[in-house]
Image: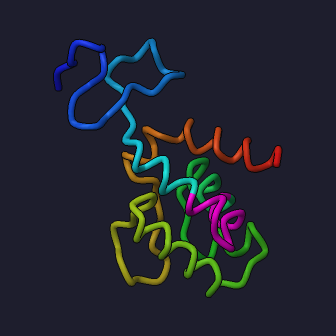
Amino acid sequence: MGFNGNNVPSRGRYPYPNNRDNANKYFDPRFKRILWFLFASTRGGSTRAKITSLINEMPANANQLSTILDLNYKTVIHHLNVLIKNGLIVTDEKEIYGSTYFLTPLMEQNFQLFKEIIDKIKKI
């Protein structure tokens, strides 16, 4: 991926401003909008944020997440499906009870952006 004359990468991707030491990390501005939508603009955003943070710390299945967060199992399943649909988490064993959920590589790369959005939401 080349840079144009303004040191801005081509194809609509921009270097993440807080990651200047690693020039290979880029974020897609559309992904930032998805994060804002999922965690700040919709009902259930705080629950999805808690689930995402827990999966980052330790990949887990829906039952484990339900127990740790003290939430109804079906509620957790709903939020996991929303996160999967939007490309933030993934599981190897779809539709199998006990499937372990992990962050997608895209979400892992942009986890700092996720934390910044959550910090901004908490200040509001």
**Is 19 situated left or right of 76 in this image?**
left
The stretch of residues the image draws in magenta is 37-49
| Principal secondary structure, stretch drawn in magenta | helix
> What is the quadrant of residue 14 in the picture?
top left
**Is 118 situated left or right of 90 in this image?**
right
* Residue found farthest to the right: 123
* Residue found farthest to the left: 2
Name which residue lies at 66% across and 65% down: 45
Name which residue lies at 75% across and 68% down: 69
> What is the quadrant of residue 62 in the picture?
bottom right
Q: Is residue 35 above or below residue 110?
A: below
| Residue 109, position as x, y percentages in the image | 43, 38
Q: How many marks?
A: 0
| Residue 73, position as x, y percentages in the image | 65, 84
Name which residue lies at 21% across and 36% down: 11
Q: Is residue 121 above or below residue 14?
A: below
Q: Is residue 122 above or below residue 74?
A: above
Name which residue lies at 21% across and 18% down: 4
> Would you say residue 34 sits in the magenta stretch?
no
Please tell me which residue lies in front, 53 or 24: 24
| Residue 120, position as x, y percentages in the image | 73, 43
> Would you say residue 42 sits in the magenta stretch?
yes
**Is 44 situated left or right of 21 in this image?**
right
Q: How is the image coloured?
A: rainbow
* Residue found farthest to the bottom: 74
Quadrant where the N terminus sits is top left
* Residue found farthest to the front: 6
| Residue 79, position as x, y percentages in the image | 57, 74
**Is 95 situated left or right of 112 in this image?**
left
